[in-house]
Amino acid sequence: MTRGGGVLGLVEKGFWLGPSVAGGDPSGDETMAEFTVELPEELVVELGSREALAGRAKQALVLDLLRQGQISQGQAAALLGVSRWDILDLMARDHIPSSPLTAEEAERDVEVAERRTETAAVHAGG
């Protein structure tokens, strides 16, 4: 991994994309993902330590996966090594709905809304 020339390696201590375990280190059959992000060195310095920046990038990625419905709240909490309550706080901060609808739930909500609309129209004399 190159550290010079503004290349920031995000495979720093504490940056691991897998279930949280004691000490944040991978164990067992878990796999690790490794990637780098290129940023101007001035920006890296401005944003703080490489470890802090790696943690920030990891949190942003995990929350984006959660927002897209690709992982669950429990998985997000495990990946970030935080409690389910902490995940709810992070979700609120980033305006991520706490219970995304499945297709079936959305259809049921639409059906209920249509029935209510029809009932209201009947009672209104329409």
Image: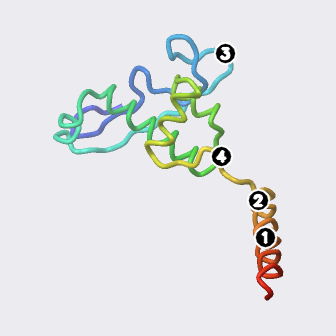
Residue type at tag 4: Ser
The residue labelled by disc 1 is: 116
The disc, 1 or 2, on the residue closer to the chain's N-terminal end is 2
x 53%, y 23%: residue: 81
Q: How far apart are labels 3 and 4 at the CA level?
A: 31 Å
Q: How far apart are labels 3 and 1 at the CA level?
A: 53 Å
Picture quarter with the C terminus: bottom right
Q: How far apart are labels 1 and 2 at the CA level?
A: 20 Å
Residue type at tag 2: Ala
The disc, 3 or 2, on the residue closer to the chain's N-terminal end is 3
The residue labelled by disc 4 is: 99
Q: Viewer-nearest of labels 3 and 4?
A: 4
The disc, 3 or 4, on the residue closer to the chain's N-terminal end is 3
In which image quadrant can residue 48 be found?
top left
Picture quarter with the N terminus: top left
**How many numbered dots are placed on residues in this image?**
4
Q: How far apart are labels 4 and 2 at the CA level?
A: 13 Å
x 21%, y 40%: residue: 5
In which image quadrant can residue 71 be found?
top right
Q: How far apart are labels 4 and 1 at the CA level?
A: 23 Å
User: Viewer-proximal residue, 59 or 90?
Assistant: 90
The residue labelled by disc 2 is: 103
Q: Viewer-nearest of labels 3 and 2?
A: 2
The disc, 3 or 1, on the residue closer to the chain's N-terminal end is 3
